Amino acid sequence: MSTVRIALAPGDLVFREGDAPTTAFLIEEGRVDVTTEREGQTIRLATLGPGDLLGEMAIIDDAPRTATATAAEPCLLLAIDRAAIGERLEQADPIIRTLLESQLRRYRGALAAMQGRGGAPTPAATPAVSASEQLSIGKFRLESQLREALTTRGLDLRLQPLYEIPSRRVTGFEALVRWNHPERGPISPLEFITLAEETSLINPVGEYVLDAAIESLRALRGEQDVGPFIGINVSPRQLAETRLIERIVERTAALGVSPDRIKVEITESQMVDYPTVRRLVKRCHEFGIKVAMDDFGTGYSNLGHLYELEFDTVKVDQTFPRKMFQSPRAMALLRSIVDMIHAIGADVVVEGIESERQLAALAEMGVRYAQGYLIGKPLLLPDALAFETGAFSPVDS
Ligand code: C2E
Ligand code: CA
Ligand code: CA
């Protein structure tokens, strides 16, 4: 970023209406008058002083200057290069950029009307909405519909069975949320969880999932007192902001379910905030809640996570079983990952199991849990209950 200091005497011009924008200015000392012409008359729009930004508007929306700026007294300005602003705008949250751009458009419209330039802008005079603006507006719409879905129970929970290979039984489930959108049909959590994570909306969505999952546990009583466990996915923002553990403890107590039937799943790529995750794992264990590292083997695969954080379970990402019979290297890696996780005393779940051949290979490796379409797809509660008989075995069927 290049910055230059400019000293001006009273009456010196900073820029003139209609000029192409090259620079914005930060006023360090003195005052600057911002004026416009209407029917031969000079109208003062504002007088800016130390700390104020000047001329940034034309840079942000890449349009000619809409007013003239003149030093009203001796001034010292800091020139901010157009590229430096552009770079920051590029990096800005697209939603914030859209808000800024639409605000500027409104301001320019009002200014044009005041200057007698055509009153209300015609559609042709209004700059077309850019693709990124459309995307941002689409996000706003989706976000407000998601808020509505929370109140109208437009979200539902699916339960995907986890098969315990040695006992040949389904002994747990993973809670996977679905949004039944009124116009678009079911929307994948991959789309709306990311959206919810961009705002605090993830908190009510997370609470909704948590409450629904614990309610399902009550229904999934299992045989005697040892019912199946349920894995609940949590987002980084939930870890940082919500009373996640307190809520689990309160809700399980209220419904008479033991908290050791809950397994919190944290994606490996979320481990960036070590102290928060470490605290979470420790507190979960104080209450008997289990913790799983999700999607191991994708992206970050930092072995430090494995020994520094005491996970009860590690879930190996579906990319490994998908490639295991095509690539001897993928098979060798999967085997080593399984051995490594066993060596630290954690359970292994391998995700994305779609064939009996894959399941047999996992059994041979000594993997405890398999999850995937072979065992069952994510199901609504009544269908999940059918797995509870304990008689199910994909190998026998
Ligand atoms: P994940 O935790 O890795 O969940 C497993 C995903 O793989 C699920 O997709 C599941 O439907 C899919 N899957 C399971 N078995 C198979 C298989 O055999 N083959 C194939 N091709 N796919 C299989 P889904 O439900 O679309 O969820 C996607 C991701 O969204 C999840 O990945 C999880 O990261 C996130 N997610 C889902 N529900 C929640 C939630 O309640 N809260 C949060 N924070 N994230 C959630
Ligand atoms: Ca998961
Ligand atoms: Ca996963």
Image (spheres, rainbow, N blue to C red):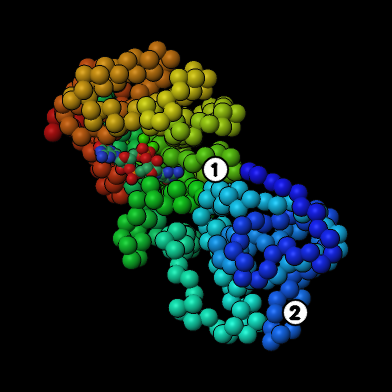
Quadrant of residue 146 within the rendered picture: bottom left
Q: Position of residue 106 (x, y in %)?
A: 58, 73
Split into quadrants, the picture shows ligand 1 in the one at top left
Say what amino acid the circle numbered 1 marks: Arg
Residue 309 at x, y percent in the picture: 51, 23
Q: Which numbered disc flags the more N-terminal residue, 2 or 1?
A: 2
Q: Circle 1 — which element?
A: helix
Amino acid identity at mark 2: Ile
Q: Quadrant of the N terminus?
A: top right
Residue at position x 42%, y 52% in the image: 192
Can residue 60 be seen by looking at this rendering? yes
* Mark number, residue 43: 2
For the residue pair 302 and 253, the one nearer the viewer reads as 302
Can you give x and y, in whole percent of width and height, for residue 133 in the image? 47, 62
- Relative side of 176 to 205, left or right: left
Task: Name the residue: 26% across, 47% down.
Answer: 383
**Image side of residue 362 versus residue 291, left or right:** left
User: How busy is the neighbourhood of tag 2: few (under 14 within 10 Å), some, or many (20 plus)?
Assistant: some
Quarter residue 375 falls in: top left
